[in-house]
Amino acid sequence: MTSAIAALATGAAVPKARFDWKPIALLVGIAALGLPLIGSPSTWITLTVAGLAMGMIVFIIASGLTLVFGLMDVLNFGHGVFIALGAFIATSVMGGMSAWAGDSGAANLVAVFTAMLVAMAVAGAVGWAFERVIVRPVYGLHLKQILITMGGMIVGEEIIKVIWGPLQIPLPLPDVLRGAYLLGDAAVEKYRVLAMLIGALVFAALAFTLNRTKIGLLIRAGVQDREMVESLGYRIRQLFVGVFVAGSALAGLGGVLWGLYQQTVVPQIGGQVTVLLFIVIIIGGLGSTLGCFVGALLVGLMANYTGFLAPKVALFSNIGLMVAVLLWRPQGLYPVTNR
Amino acid sequence: MTGNLLELKGVHTHIGAYHILHGVNLQVPEGRVTMLLGRNGAGKTTTLRTIMGLWPASQGELRFRGESLRGRATPDVASLGIAYVPESMGIFTDLTVQENMVLAARGARHAGELDAQRLEWIFGLFPALKKFWLFPAGKLSGGQKQMLAVARAIVEPRALLLVDEPSKGLAPSIINNLITAFNELKRQKTTILLVEQNFNMARALGDTVAVMDNGAVVHAGAMRELADDQALQQRLLGLSLGTHQ
């Protein structure tokens, strides 16, 4: 680094922006509020871990969706098909490797991670075709985007039925991921810990890419002003295809995690979470990855706490959360300024 | 005498159903500052956007160093060495000043790869950018944002700068700062096509001038001629220097 720039980077007189901690504080506040309401600390720990694991999986799935919307203003209601694809590929890969894996814990873990990699590769490839055939003709046309991407999801689900059949397929957790770690009286399921770790890894990778690389800089700039990025000499269309493929691959990974979380897979598995995904990206601020992360964790915690405290209102709890957040911050927790 | 770096011949532009440019003829001589003047709605911004390929020309010729720009995508136009500062400034407000500059420098992957000597020169022109280097650009004042917009355009050497109304809404002291910066660029023989409503700024900077009305260039010549001819100013721009000094 040159001395001039190094001096700038470390100069004491340089004002820096303050990070907005309030949405994080809201997350911590909701978790803290849950403790007295639930009463039992061990139940609270179990529910909190379950909520965070669910939130991490939802974040993995939704992160691609929020970037695609932010970067190219594309409302992709067909995102769910990549989730379903990922989940069904997991059934095939893990089923196909079950005889090889046998009772070995390590081999079963290899099968799970292989399923994740294959699901990401296939979902990414299908995402590339989906963008070319379905999304590209309707850039800038929101109503058509909604209709054609929903249509794309229906067609995708039917193709899944043709390949894997219309019935639900079990996707059992391998023994190595069954059971729980005991923290005092609290039981923390092993699989949820794995889901949290993978979610944290994806968030760290995305945060690094977006904040520390030129590609990330271009994505963040493109979310704000596509035209200006092109005026600087960059081909945003190629960038968009890359983001769409990466987002589809992440949805495929999320599909594997979600399928293992549910332990059964149906062709409609993607459609079932689509509403949740849109709640998350709206809460977070359209186009914001950090907002998507915090929003997904909020949704996960809220779903688990209300599911325990008041099961009848659990279905509506996330809608209520979205209304409350939008009343506080109409553009979401971390709004993208130029949108 | 210098040749023309950019030349437009009979350029028409349609935006949807609207016919905005009606056969624009414009020459931008190399190493000079050309002012593009005209009333609101005359077609100045559309001309710049058509050059950049942001709105495609429906008819006519656009030539940069003799090469046609027709049909080229915006990134291709920019890659020829044409920098564009839009009227909205196009600042990435969620990015820091540093990140905005790194993005504009196509050859740099991170701040460490920015040309330090050129950066010092830019800081000399716009000291506020040094002070707010790690600050989100959205938090800058209007004048500082305009400085950043211009700085971004010159972070690497460019053959041609297209600048759309840089003085719009700025305080006189900031406008003077911009005039100083553009004069510095002018001394370095940078070719600039500058859209401006502020006639004093145009007079201070321009070597040549083109005046637009109703989507066509209705007058072209030396800036000095227009500056010295109040009747011509009155006829073309509806202003007299007496009230604008």
Image (cartoon, rainbow, N blue to C red):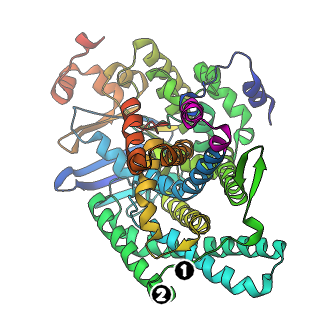
Residue A24: % across, % down: 58, 33
Q: Report the disc number at residue A213.
A: none
| Residue type at tag 1 | Ile
| Predominant SS along the magenta part | helix
Query: Which segment is the magenta one?
Result: A25-45
Foreground residue among A338 and B213: A338
Quadrant hosting residue A1: top right
* Crowdedness near tag 2: few (<14), some (14–19) or many (≥20) residues, C-alpha within 10 Å: few
Quadrant hosting residue B202: top left
Is residue A28 a member of the stretch shown in magenta? yes
For the point 79% across and 81% down, which residue is it? A101
Residue B9: % across, % down: 30, 55
Q: Is mark 2 in CB contact (under 8 Å) with mark 1?
A: yes
- Residue behind mark 1: A169
Above or below, comparing residue A327 to residue B4 in the picture: above
Q: Chain of mark 1?
A: A
Above or below, comparing residue B119 to residue B170 in the picture: below
- Residue behind mark 2: A165
Q: CA distance from mark 2 to mark 1?
A: 9 Å
Residue A302: % across, % down: 50, 43
